[in-house]
Image (cartoon, helix red, strand yellow):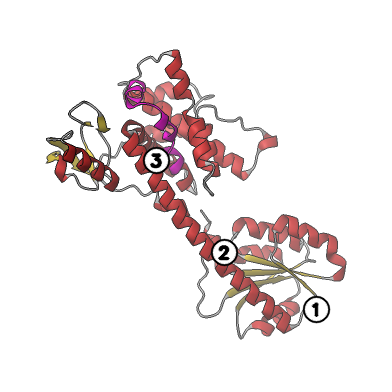
Amino acid sequence: MTSETGAVPTRNDKPKILFVDDDPLALEGLSRSVYREFKADLAEGPEAGLEKIKNDGPYIVVISDMRMPVMDGAEFLSRVRNIAPDSIRVMLTGCADTEAAMRAVNEGRIFRFLNKPVTGEDLAQTLRGCVAQYDLMRREKELLEKTLTGAIRVLAEVLQLANPVAFSKGARICQYVRHIARKLCLSDTWQYEIAAMLSELGCLTLTPDLLETIHHGEPLSPENEKRYSQHPRIAHDLLVRIPRLELVADMILQQKEVPADLPQFRSPAADTVRRGAQMLKVSLAFDGLLSTGTERQEALLTLSRSPVDYDAQMVAALGDFRLSRGPTELRPVDVCDLRTGMILNENLRSTTGVLIASKGHQVSPALMKAVRNFVEDGTVKGTVLVTVGTGETWVSKAAGR
C-alpha cells in the first residue's frame, strides 16, 4: 500500500536521515553534529529535497528548515507526507515562525519542532526519538498487515464455503479487474483486486439457487430483485469496519452506481474509489454477458456502445483478455483425493443435490475439510473432474508489499 518512497529504509548500522535547508553552511553544521550516530544526506532547498526522497530514499527521518524560497518548510513536509508517508518529519523553526509552524502541524503532521539554533545533543536526542517512533510504527504496521491479510483470507474462505456461486463469480471478476489494472498501468492494484474478489460478499445472505438464477440471466421476482440489489450495501457494512479496507468497501458499495467525477469532490481517495467502482461495474457487466452465452467480442461491443455507463478505456482493456483456467488436462479425481490448488471443472454437489462448490473453484484447505465432512456423512461420493490451477496473488498484496 505504500509507494517505493515509503518502503523500509536500508539501515546499514546507522539510521538514514535527510536534512533540507537552502543554506549549505547550515546543512554542513547539522550533518557534522550527528554523523557518529546517523547517516545524513543533504539537500539544498525543498525541490532538491523532494528529488532526494524520490531518487535516494526512503529516509527514516526528514528534517526541514521552515524559511526557504520557492516553498516553505510547511509545504515541503506536506509533500513529503504524500510521497513518503512512513518518514518521520521534523521542523526547524525560528521564534517568529509560530503561525507557519501551526500550519506545518495541520498540513504536514510533523513529529517534532526544534527551535534554532539547536545544539548537537538536542538534535541527536530528537533523532533518537524519531527512530524509536519509526520502529514502533513499522511494528504496528506489520501487525496490521498480517491481521488484514488473515481477515481477507477468512472472508474469502467463508464466502467459498457458504456460497460457492458467489465466490466463483468474485474470482472471475478479480481476473477481469487485474487485467484492466495491468493494461492501464495502475498502482496499488491490491485494493481493486480485493474489491473484486469480495464484491459478492453480501451475497452470503442469498441462497445458492437464487445466485444460479442470476448467473444464468434468468428473470427475478420483484422480491428477489430487491434482495439481490442490497448485497453491495451488506458487503460494504461488513468491510468498512476493517482498517485499511474503507476504500475497498466504498468501491463495492458503488459498483452499480459509480459517482460522478465532480471537481468539488475530487481527491486522491475519491478518485481511487471511483476508478475501482467503475472497474467493478465494467467487469460485472462483461461477466454477466458472458454468463448468458454472449461471445466475448460481442459483449465488448455491447459495453462500448454505452460509454456513459462503462468507461471506454476499461472496456478496451478487456479486448485481449483470456480467462486463466490453468493447465488444460482434465483428470477425474475421487472426492477424497481433492487437494489444494486443484480447480473444479464441474459442479460438485451432494447426493441430495446441494451445491458444495461450483465449476471453476480453486480448492482451498477449508473446502477440502468441508468435503471430507460430507464424505464421512455419506452425502458426497464419487469422482469429480479437476485440473491443477495456479494460486491467486491478491491476498499477499493486501499489505502493500
How far apart are the alpha carbons under marks 1 and 2? 29 Å
**What stretch of residues is rendered in magenta?**
194-214
Which image quadrant for residue 258? top right
Q: Which mark is residue 179?
A: 3
Q: What residue type is labelled 3?
A: His
Q: Where is residue 365 in the image (x, y as percent from the top left)?
A: 27, 48
Residue 65 lies left or right of residue 307; in this view the side is right
Element on which disc 2 rests: helix
Which image quadrant for residue 43? bottom right
Secondary structure mostly seen in the magenta stretch: helix
Q: Position of residue 370 (x, y in %)?
A: 25, 41
Element on which disc 1 rests: loop
- Position of 32 relative to 342 (above/below): below
Residue occupying the point 17% across, 29% down: 351
Viewer-nearest of discs 1 and 2: 2
* Label 2: how many Cα within 10 Å (few below 14, some 14–19, many 20+): some
Q: Where is residue 147 in the image (x, y as percent from the top left)?
A: 46, 54
How far apart are the alpha carbons under marks 2 and 3? 33 Å
Q: Is residue 379 magenta?
A: no
Q: Which amino acid does label 2 sit on?
A: Met
Residue 42 lies left or right of residue 359; in this view the side is right
Q: Where is residue 57 in the image (x, y as percent from the top left)?
A: 56, 67
Q: Earlier in the sequence, mark 2 or mark 3?
A: 2
Q: Residue 117 carries which label?
A: 1
The residue singled out by tag 2 in the image is: 137
Q: Which of marks 1 and 2 is nearer the N terminus?
A: 1
Q: Can residue 375 be seen in this view?
A: yes
How far apart are the alpha carbons under marks 1 and 3? 55 Å
